[in-house]
Image (cartoon, coloured by chain):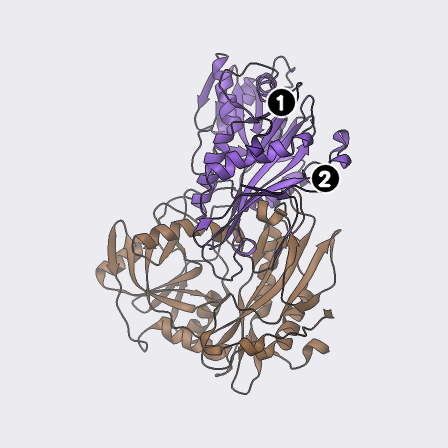
Chain colours: A purple, B brown
């Protein structure tokens, strides 16, 4: 690993209470380039730009996938990653499906620890603050041929994130647009999946909904995901979530919610969720909550859902009554070292690990 | 339109008989940037690079679409585009579906003519030679937020292309992988659609097939496209091709083949093609040809198809007997001004139009 530190740190500009999420970047980034059938040396270098022409293959044929993860700083200043092995496994599943080279543990896990160690001063301390981390792989060969690229870049960039209250949102159950096909790439964190979702989301916004509940493309009869999150439904005291498949992302927050709920003795059913089952539960008054989960917001509760032209209001549970809120609180507690971690999910980033 | 000509033309390096297709670019490119809700000035400038960081939105969320088109030089040295209005309409359909700003006629059609005019010396003359042209739009904002970008680049780049003989290929009828979902983006020339096809194509290659015949994702019972091309099937003397839909690209070569066939009095049926219909016709000996059509190769005949573990050999018609070959010859004749153009498809690029 080559470490080239910046001589112009920008950290004095960091105002923790006014972070522009996603456009403020830490001093360094990790970069590794693939050529002639192999990855080159891992480099940690000042965050910055490369040069590209419009013939860059990623811009033309969309070979690109990414991960989203966070680092947390506890009250003593110790820094933790959350289940990084899961992201490492998943980026390689995405890469494989997109005919891209898989990355090594050294590049992903060890590289990530070194980067976070070097820029640990950038991680804001305090309730809900974190460092949002974005590993990505994209095709860099400059050629107009509709085939897999011969050159790639793996990069890790990161942006400090402040705590934000995620107000309950309204969601529209999709009866036309889809995000994934059978035998497609819905399970991958492929760049193209996101672009495909923006226009249907704009239409949902215009109809008064913040997000879409995606349904299966063949029948629109089953819940799949919600916005860019996995979805959970609570009927009476039972939690339902769809099984992962080639159309549904194997979310790490999803998996963590399931584990936490089971440990509390809650009943969790991982099975297909028919739209009609949810609508009927709403009619009968047994539908208690619906929420989405993902790395960025951890979880987001829904206050209303649109279905076939009707807007159905969901109950507003108190934080104490809400399973979504209770599980979220516990998860954040584990992530930020405020409570015991019986699962071994937290991974300490040792100080000075970058130089070992 | 701002025209900034290169002072270092690379045209002396162009060896028409040894063109490296897709990686040799003409001296200039067209560029136009979108910011603050509007497109800036159209610039024709030396082909080259821009700087970007790994936070560029296109690399993360895949907002990118493109067109493929060609310019031809006739024996007198006149230069023609082929149905450019169709590409202009289609790129805007793609852009809309990907929540990207549409481009103007001035940027696309007039810009294209100016670019081709300036670099007309790069267009190789002779049977089958052409200039392959790639207009594309991609998201350039540098931010990690899963929403549509606020900044875009529209570019047109081009690469000289030599005539190449497209040998008949073997195709595998897909019974698992899919390229498009109902309510998805299959009809758009979206970057992400191509990346999604590479891995299934690799698997087909390993099984001894060059391309995939994509089928509908719900049942795999109907032909949709073939590789990156639209597909035609001839049974006895009738030509079949699937209707365009939200899953199938509205191909300009497809449309031209249909028009040419109808004009010759051939029977053309635009309707769903059940896989079983093709397999049965093969058994009964009435299946005459299957071929794909697209801008790059115009058309490519198939010599065998794989289905449920069997390799079915297709008849090898002579060029005279083949509808695919006859229609291709006529289309290239029209494109390159070797024969009359009753449809008004050819568009002359006037000399000096860039400076008008």
Q: Is residue B275 above or below residue A237?
A: below
Where is residue A37? Give x, y as percent: 43, 52
For this view, does A213 lie left or right of residue B292?
Answer: right
Same chain? Circles 1 and 2: yes
Residue occupying the point 65% across, 76% down: B118
Res B87 quadrant in image = bottom right
Query: B60 or B336, which lies in front?
Result: B60
> Which quadrant is home to the C terminus of chain A?
top right
Where is residue A8? Give x, y as percent: 73, 42
Count residues near mark 2 (Cα–Cα under 10 Å), then give few for <14, some for 14-19, many for 20+: few
Secondary structure state at the residue bearing disc 2: loop
Residue topped by disc 2:
A9
Res A78 label: 1
Whether residue B202 is visible here, answered yes or no, is yes
Query: A55 or B286, which lies in front?
Result: A55
Query: A55 or A287, which lies in front?
Result: A55
Where is residue B239? Give x, y as percent: 37, 66
| Protein chain holding label 2 | A
């Amino acid at each position: 690993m080559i470490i080239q530190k910046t001589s112009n740190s920008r950290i004095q500009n960091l105002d923790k209470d006014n972070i522009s999420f996603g456009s403020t970047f830490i001093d360094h980034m990790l970069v590794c380039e693939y050529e002639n059938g192999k990855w080159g040396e891992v480099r940690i270098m000042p965050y910055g730009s490369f040069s590209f022409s419009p013939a860059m293959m990623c811009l033309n044929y969309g070979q690109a996938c990414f991960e989203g993860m966070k680092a947390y700083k506890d009250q003593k200043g110790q820094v933790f990653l959350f289940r990084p092995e899961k992201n490492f496994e998943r980026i390689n599943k995405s890469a494989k499906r997109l005919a891209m080279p898989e990355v090594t543990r050294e590049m992903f896990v060890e590289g990530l620890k070194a980067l976070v160690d070097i820029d640990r001063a950038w991680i804001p301390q305090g309730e809900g603050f974190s460092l949002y981390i974005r590993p990505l792989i994209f095709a860099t060969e400059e050629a107009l041929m509709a085939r897999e690229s011969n050159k790639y870049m793996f990069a890790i960039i990161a942006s400090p994130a402040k705590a934000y209250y995620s107000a309950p949102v309204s969601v529209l159950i999709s009866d036309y647009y889809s995000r994934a096909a059978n035998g497609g790439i819905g399970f991958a964190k492929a760049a193209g999946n996101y672009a495909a979702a923006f226009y249907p989301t704009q239409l949902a916004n215009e109809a008064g909904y913040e997000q879409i509940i995606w349904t299966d493309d063949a029948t629109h009869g089953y819940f799949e995901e919600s916005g860019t999150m996995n979805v959970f439904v609570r009927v009476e005291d039972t939690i339902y979530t769809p099984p992962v498949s080639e159309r549904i992302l194997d979310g790490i927050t999803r998996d963590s919610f399931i584990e936490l709920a089971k440990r509390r003795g809650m009943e969790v059913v991982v099975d297909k969720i028919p739209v009609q089952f949810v609508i009927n539960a709403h009619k009968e008054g047994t539908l208690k909550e619906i929420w989405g989960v993902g790395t960025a917001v951890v979880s987001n509760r829904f206050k209303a859902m649109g279905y076939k032209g009707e807007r159905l209001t969901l109950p507003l549970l108190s934080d104490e009554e809400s399973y979504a809120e209770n599980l979220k609180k516990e998860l954040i507690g584990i992530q930020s070292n405020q409570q015991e971690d019986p699962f071994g999910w937290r991974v300490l980033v040792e100080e000075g690990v970058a130089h070992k």
